[in-house]
Image: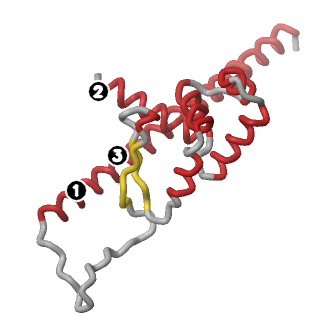
Amino acid sequence: MSVRVIVRTFSELCVTVGAVIVLFVVYVLFWTGVRADRAMDDQIDALHEQWDRQTAGPAPSASPTGAAPQPSYRGGRPFAVMYIPRLGFTWNKPVLEGTDCVVALRALGEDTRVRIVGLLLQSPLDVNEIAARLGVSQYNVSKHLRILREAGLSADEIAALVRDGVTKAASNT
């Protein structure tokens, strides 16, 4: 085999591997966000329909003890919509039963973490870039990212949430 054939074969393999990697990245960064956004929008719509039916329906009757009847809860069913205006006026996500939203809200209760989420919504950044933009130490950024991750808000999820919000805001204008 000549050197030319070996180089051409290696080049074709590199191009093929590169194309596969690009397609995988597009799938992970874009398509999974689209699917998750559709699912969350469906849950929010179902929740609003449920609220409309409850508002239009008859008033709940009191139980023999005089207390109002409690709704039955099932894990994974939406029961509230969370709005955080600091993340954009279109940022709204359903809260599902079995989800510990207190932990997530507590994680977003620190101004530095909200600023980190804001930066990650604009573009993916590493710890050093976030530290430089916020003017805080790398250790501090790592600590805040760990807290967000422990609350169930990974950088990928935050970026997907921001990306979804930016897409909605652009489509509304």
SS for dot 1: helix
Badge number at residue 41:
3
Label 2 is placed on what type of residue?
Asn
Residue 7 vertical placement versus 115 (above, below)? above
SS for dot 2: helix
Residue 3 vertical placement versus 171 (above, below)? above
Q: CA distance from mark 1 to mark 2?
A: 22 Å
> Which of pointers 1 and 2 lies earlier in the amino acid sequence?
1
**Position of 173 compared to 60: left or right?**
right
The residue carrying mark 1 is 49
Label 1 crowd (10 A; few <14 / some 14-19 / many >=20) = few
Label 1 is placed on what type of residue?
Glu
Label 3 is placed on what type of residue?
Asp
Residue 119: x %, y % from top left: 58, 27
> Which of pointers 3 and 1 lies earlier in the amino acid sequence?
3
For the point 44% across and 42% down, which residue is it?
A: 35
Residue 166: x %, y % from top left: 42, 28
Q: Which quadrant holds residue 129?
A: top right
The residue carrying mark 2 is 172
> Which of pointers 3 and 2 lies earlier in the amino acid sequence?
3
Render colour scheme: secondary structure
> Answer yes or no: do the residues labelled 1 and 2 have beta carbons within 8 Å?
no
